[in-house]
Amino acid sequence: MTPPVQDRPAPEATAELALPIDDTGLAERLRERLVAVESALFDHATSRAPFVTEAARHLLAAGGKRFRPLLVLLAAEAGPRPAAPEVLTAACVVEITHVGSLYHDDVMDEADLRRGADSANSRWDNLVAILTGDFLFAKSSELTAQLGPDAVRIQAETFTRLVEGQILETVEPGPDEDPLAHYLEVVAGKTGSLIATSAHYGALFSGASPEVVEALTEYGELVGTAFQLSDDILDIASETEESGKTPGTDLREGVPTLPVLMARASTDPGDARLVELLDPKRTDLAADADAHAEALELLRKHPAMDEARAYVVARAQEAKKLLAALPEGSVRSALEAFADVVAVRSA
């Protein structure tokens, strides 16, 4: 017996696109398909056990920009079959994989909020959050199997990179390793991999040419990197009501991010206190609320924030250059806008 729907919003309420699209026809097509994806996501996050269904749908119901499924749908417009059933299935695969990773992320970060709602580990406990993430990963694997062996291989490689990125995030770089290079490897695996796959799937299952599939996959990798870097900047710069997450979570947990690494490299005597607070050997920011607040305030005012933003914008510009493989038109313009929105987003 199918369990009752828990906390399921009307699909129409989640149909707004997370980027501006001038072509009203394209915008309407994407909106309609995103509604279909949204409905399917809740259907897929269903278990025989009502409690599992409730837990699995918890973060889905909290909303989100749905950047990954939107990118699948948008990349699919580069091929002759943008509305193919496989495209919609692939859009569900990437979002369910992403949401599953959020459950695990929140356990690792000990986060209390996600998308403005209680994180699963806060609402229930770590065990429920971890197993719910595993359940969603299993669901994404079931869906991927419907897409054929190529999709299974792509998903397996993507998942390997995603998990490796999460593991590397917990490991200090070696004495001869560049901390920034280590950090960017984490970002590429943890976030870039799945967003690259989103663009790859959309182009592949819509029948785009191999050249376009390759260009959009590389585009997705760069956009994914920019997405995570901008997310890390938001972790410092935004307030809770803007981002839907607890500000300074990465800073509190000692996770080095782009602004932190740039600020740590400062040799300005005026930055001595901030550099002291950001010392990787320091472990008291999680327990000392005053020290955490001081570090957050100093970092928000530091030039490293603008340097980090400039770096993110540069990655978005690199991604846009790859779109030369597509003909000029509304689809290419929308993909350019997608890269811009990711680079400068405020939530």
Image (cartoon, rainbow, N blue to C red):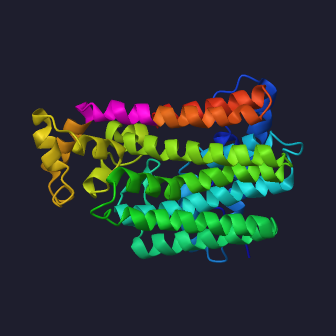
The one nearer the camera, 17 or 217, is 217
Residue 304 magenta-highlighted = yes
Report whether 340 appears left or right of 114.
right
Could you tell me which residue is drawn at 19 percent across and 55 percent down?
285
Q: Main secondary structure of the magenta part?
A: helix
Q: Quadrant of residue 167?
A: bottom left
The one nearer the camera, 69 or 58, is 69
Q: Is residue 95 above or below residue 307?
A: below
Q: Where in the figure is residue 284, as x and y percent of width and height?
A: 15, 59
Q: Is residue 33 above or below residue 111?
A: above
Q: Where in the figure is residue 48, as x and y percent of width and height?
A: 67, 77
Q: Which residues are magenta?
A: 300-311
Q: Which residue is at the far front?
A: 176
Q: Where in the figure is residue 227, as x and y percent of width and height?
A: 51, 43
Q: Where in the figure is residue 161, as x and y percent of width and height?
A: 55, 64
Q: Quadrant of residue 156?
A: bottom right
